[in-house]
Amino acid sequence: MEAVTGPWKQLLLNALESNSHLRHSSFFQLATVGLNGRPSNRTVVFRGLEENTDKIQIHTDYRTHKIEELRHCPYAEICWYFTDSWEQFRVNGKIDILDESNPDLNKVQQREKSWYASSLKSRLQYLGPSPDLPCLSELPDQEFLDHSTGPVGAFCLLVLDPDQVDYLNLKSNQRIKFTSGLSVNGEKCWTSQRINP
Amino acid sequence: MEAVTGPWKQLLLNALESNSHLRHSSFFQLATVGLNGRPSNRTVVFRGLEENTDKIQIHTDYRTHKIEELRHCPYAEICWYFTDSWEQFRVNGKIDILDESNPDLNKVQQREKSWYASSLKSRLQYLGPSPDLPCLSELPDQEFLDHSTGPVGAFCLLVLDPDQVDYLNLKSNQRIKFTSGLSVNGEKCWTSQRINP
């Protein structure tokens, strides 16, 4: 048992820092299980860790397939490859969907905070036509949002609570598997083990 | 119905060409479904298309978890993001495992061809300790292979036969969904549709 937030968090923060000159360093691939039982996989943007935790935040449109997939199976695996430092993080965990209908006051505030933290251009996307559906028109949308408008219905915050992290460093050829468990007092704690790359 | 190999193949070849100056442009993320029903996701290397087809080749170690996962559920989704051209290909399909025990002569030859096409350094990895298992020793391996040695037992060729491709271009903000079907004479054919990003 090494630490409550797990030593992988520091490895991730280091990777983010050393790859921060690359725009795509905040992009990772999120795998879910489709309603047909087949895997789904898409690139999403890292929107920070929830304050004082190791939970990973993602923004998404409520109308995308991944929402119904996550309602059916809430587990996901992030694969995050850092192209400059040659490090890979595979983060497996359960996703909490914070949407408009969520009654928990903490979560309402968390969703609002995420909304206001994103750019106006990002926010406008949630007013566009429904993602994944056929294009009906070539006309640009005439939607309008001002800075003070709160989160729109389609805006959704996903929070992934990791319970296993597989870290691979291709420069040092080291691989570490971090696994979470519960301590005797019910707190989450992490163990780690070197495994073969 | 547009063409037998699907117009997405040319889009993919163009993306490979325009991103070829980046070493990581041949890396993509492969999602499978784990034995516990949760998604798995990892970075793998593109090893080319099978000759005259649109089937995607990947090399892997037979001893990795992905093999047992694919035996359980043969479907996978590739998410391939090209960091310079801002293009994403999500390729969903069924994976065929070409391992040592495969009796089909064509497949035996295909696996051999893939083996000899990879570098001696890549080949040596298949003689190392079992991936995913705990490290037992810090000692380097004393394995030896010469150029003429054929594929070792752990070497495995995966061939993904795509049946759906979701193409997204973040520069033009265009997205196209390609879906395969069977023509009246039993041949695979592709349809495409513009969908909202």
Image (spheres, coloured by chain):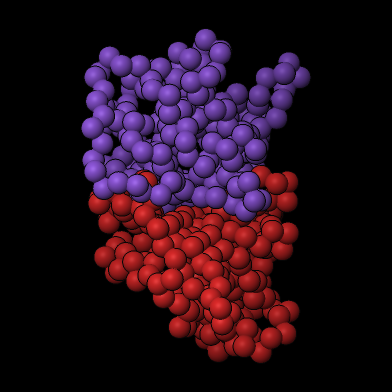
Chain colours: A purple, B red
**Front residue (pair B87, B167):** B167
User: Relative to residue B78, is residue A166 depicted above or below?
Assistant: above
Residue drawn at (62%, 53%), measured in percent from left and top?
A: A38
User: Relative to residue A58, is residue B121 depicted above or below?
Assistant: below
Q: How many marks?
A: 0
User: Relative to residue A58, is residue A107 depicted above or below?
Assistant: above
Residue drawn at (38%, 70%), measured in percent from left and top?
A: B7
Asked whether the viewer can see residue B175, the reply is yes
Residue drawn at (76%, 19%), measured in percent from left and top?
A: A184
Residue drawn at (60%, 26%), measured in percent from left and top?
A: A3
Q: Where is residue B108 in the image (x, y as percent from the top left)?
A: 64, 85
The reply, left or right, for residue B196 in relation to residue B67 is left
Q: Position of residue A134 (x, y in %)?
A: 40, 49
Q: Where is residue A47 in the image (x, y as percent from the top left)?
A: 40, 31
Find the residue positioned furthest to the top. Answer: A105
Q: In which quarter of the image is residue A128?
A: top left
**Front residue (pair B51, B22):** B51
Q: Position of residue A138 (x, y in %)?
A: 26, 48
**Front residue (pair B65, A13):** B65
The reply, left or right, for residue A134 in relation to residue B32 is left
